[in-house]
Amino acid sequence: MLLRSKTNSDDQSFDSHNEWLSHIAEYLLSLPRSVKRLILLVSDLTLSFVCLFLALSLRYGHIAHHISPVILALCATLPILGLYLIGFYKGVARGFLDTVMGRVAQLFFILLVIYEIIIYLNPLEGVPRSVPIIFLFLFFIGLWNSRLIIRELLTRRRSHEQSRPSDSSARDNIVIYGAGEAGKDLLEGLRNSHKYHVVAYVDDDKQLIGAYLLGKKIYAAHSIKTVIKKYDVAQVFLAMPSVSRARKRQIIDRLSDISIKIQDLPSLEDLVDGKVTVSSMRKVDILDVLDRQTVQPDTRLLQKNITGKCVLVTGAGGSIGSELCRQVLKNQPKCLVLYELSEYALYSIHQELLALQAKHTHYQDAAIIAVIGNVTNEDNLYRILTKHHIQTLYHAAAYKHVPLVEFNPFEGVINNTKGTYHCARAAIRAGVATFVLISTDKAVRPTNVMGATKRMAELVCQALSQTYKEESQTCISMVRFGNVLGSSGSVVPVFTKQIEEGRPITVTHPEVTRYFMTIPEASNLVIQAGAMARGGEVFVLDMGEPVKIVDLARRMIHLSGHETKTEANPDGDIEITYTGLRPGEKLYEELIIGDDNIEPTYHPLIMQAMEHSYPLDELEAILCQVTDKQKQFDVPWLKQQFKQFVAGYQEETKA
């Protein structure tokens, strides 16, 4: 496949042949199919005669004249007849595959036996026994190479057509980064594309530089900017499914000063069919451009509370809840109950999990049950928990959008705080072994109602754990983490939609920062943290370094192949506008309330916060009044309770 290029003149000579080879291929393709088949038969018969003549000459050491032409004709024609009978001439030459030659090799072995039997019986007078071996070997090599030449002619014709100026305007010029098997398969998948035209390869391997792969030159990685400029490249396809996230980040950073769209192949685990096509391509994962490293999950922790057990997930249709359901199913529970208030969200995740179960045989032993229900309905929860003998409960149901909860404070506290109280009480009553609350970094010194309700939910869980620690078998813990990439309402899908529509990207403040983590990683860590709990812990996930939202916006614009429109670059494509902090929004988020109340665990990305708690009766007194205060819409009373119980709560944002 790889042909070494020695000099620049070789490169020019290679390119100059493309046009006349294309004309030859075009003429051959224009002929009727019967004529093309006849040409192949005649050319193969001629080749057979030549190979037989060479075999005799090599055997005798001189040109042999003493053998009958009739015998020679019979010997040379027999392989052609065999090829015709096995359907060798029914295939399309342009679609010739090397595997076809396996059947030809089997045929030639049978012919060799036939020749030797005939020679032994002596009707082929004057033909030595070694001649059929030499003849069939030469013919096999000649036959194979003739088909490769035809395929190459047609391939170059197609490449020539794709590189014509009239066509290039309708297609994006593409550079494939990675000249390995994935890159080769990707080019094969793009051969007939009317949207993409591959112009070159780029690779880090110095031994490949200057070589050709399927007719495309391989350039050094450090010259990628020159290649992009030379060929007017619109997109770079990363065909390196096994490369690390850090290496991908280096490649993306190398292209940070030019506007070009970058697409990526999924990981090797996702390419289960082993064949890469253009449909395999996806947008570069935004995590590839964030300075964050992931850690392989601890399988023992993942399976401890799930494998062979009955598990319930509240808020099963939400961003975190649905991913928790996927991760739970992967760890082969005995039963998985989806508890969700939204009928549509419940239907969606239920159908998705059933499809996964049908696809993977090792998921099929788990019973998947969909239940419509509200977490504030303790009796209904208790009934479901006891009916299905639930052993592990992940409580992900919550109202999470800061501005919405800010304008609907009582709905927020009833769902987030009171709902957690009833959910945890139902778990204790039903004897659930493990209860895990999904919390948020917004619960730390909150400036909004949503964060305050989540901190109150943590306090409720802490109080219940302390109160019932001796008499209950339920281990209650909380897991706190920041923003997850791709969740509903998060900045990444919002920014993506704005870029696709060509609208300005809206950022609330130039200095606003957030922690980010992928939904699958967050869900994995939640499961692992819950498995480490002994009761009452507040676990904090290591979110890495905080990211400026405006920097994230600029990166997303760049990865989409656009330029940021600024005063210095008025001709840019996408503008970033600032809308001001929303009600209750902070400039930056925190994960712990104090600087000295955090302890490590044996998991590198999970820490334990040691934070103040309150007696259960004090919190219950507040929760008992919430319903009456809601009727009066006494928001000042509610916020006064937050100030009393939630450390660092402030009503207004300090910008």
Image (cartoon, rainbow, N blue to C red):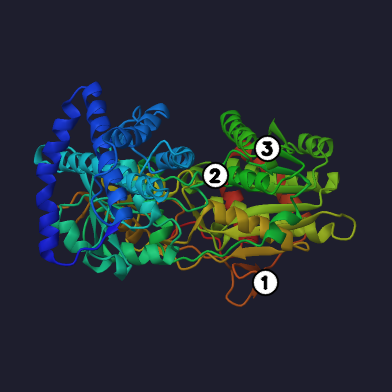
What distance separates the C-alpha of mark 2 from that of mark 3? 13 Å
Question: Which numbered tag is attached to residue 601?
Answer: 1
Quadrant (top left/top right/bottom left/bottom right) for the C terminus? bottom left
Q: Quarter of the image holding residue 478? A: bottom right
Q: Position of residue 16 (x, y in %)?
A: 9, 51
Q: Position of residue 520 (x, y in %)?
A: 55, 52
Question: Which numbered tag is attached to residue 338?
Answer: 3
Q: Nearer the viewer, residue 22 or 640?
A: 22
Which residue sits at x=58%, y=53%?
639
Q: Mark 3 or mark 1: which comes first in sequence?
A: 3
- What residue did someone put label 2 on? 319
Tell me the SS state at disc 2: helix
**How many marks do you count on the picture?**
3
Q: State yes or no: discs 2 and 1 in contact (Cβ < 8 Å).
A: no
Q: State yes or no: discs 2 and 3 in contact (Cβ < 8 Å).
A: no
Which residue sits at x=43%, y=55%?
241
Give the residue type at disc 1. Answer: Thr
Which residue sits at x=73%, y=63%?
532
In the depicted structure, whether residue 183 falls above or below residue 40: below
What distance separates the C-alpha of mark 2 from that of mark 1? 27 Å
Q: Quarter of the image holding residue 76? A: top left
Q: Position of residue 2 (x, y in %)?
A: 29, 58
Give the residue type at disc 3. Answer: Leu
